[in-house]
Image: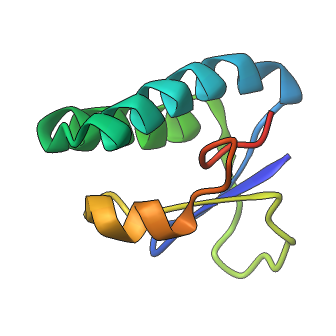
Amino acid sequence: MIVRIMGEGQWRLADSHLVELNTLDDELLAEMESGDEDGFHRTLGALLDAVSRLGDPLPDDALEPSELILPAPDASLEEVREMLSDDGLIPG
């Protein structure tokens, strides 16, 4: 799967990493619902770090369609709220 972090680039991740990403996504959703801004920023950072750690970066000139698009590290709680589906940032 190809994951894009807005403003950062794209990474190729194995589907087996979705479990870890979904766990962080669930935490992020709970923090957003409770208005925990500090927790939100901490978990968003952990989610984006997991993508970078688990995935292989694509070259800057690669034009692969992204299956997941995640917010930039400095995104606000409100900006991310607008990106959410009922399942959070990561479906499933």
Looking at the rendering, which quadrant does residue 40 occupy? top left
* 21, 26: nearer the viewer: 26
- Residue at x 80%, y 33% (from the top left corner): 92
Colouring scheme applied when the structure was drawn: rainbow
Q: Is residue 42 above or below residue 70?
A: above
- Residue at x 34%, y 43% (from the top left corner): 32
* 27, 13: nearer the viewer: 27
Q: Is residue 53 above or below residue 11?
A: above
* 43, 49: nearer the viewer: 43
Is any part of residue 87 visible from this angle?
yes
Instruction: Count numbered badges in the picture.
Output: 0
Q: Position of residue 39 (x, y in %)?
A: 21, 32
Q: Position of residue 6 (x, y in %)?
A: 51, 71
Q: Is residue 14 left or right of residue 37?
A: right
Q: Position of residue 75 (x, y in %)?
A: 31, 65
Q: Position of residue 91 (x, y in %)?
A: 77, 42
- Residue at x 41%, y 35% (from the top left corner): 28
Q: Is residue 11 left or right of residue 35?
A: right
Is any part of residue 75 visible from this angle?
no
Q: Is residue 24 left or right of residue 30?
A: right
Looking at the rendering, which quadrant does residue 44 occupy? top left
- Residue at x 37%, y 71% (from the top left corner): 79
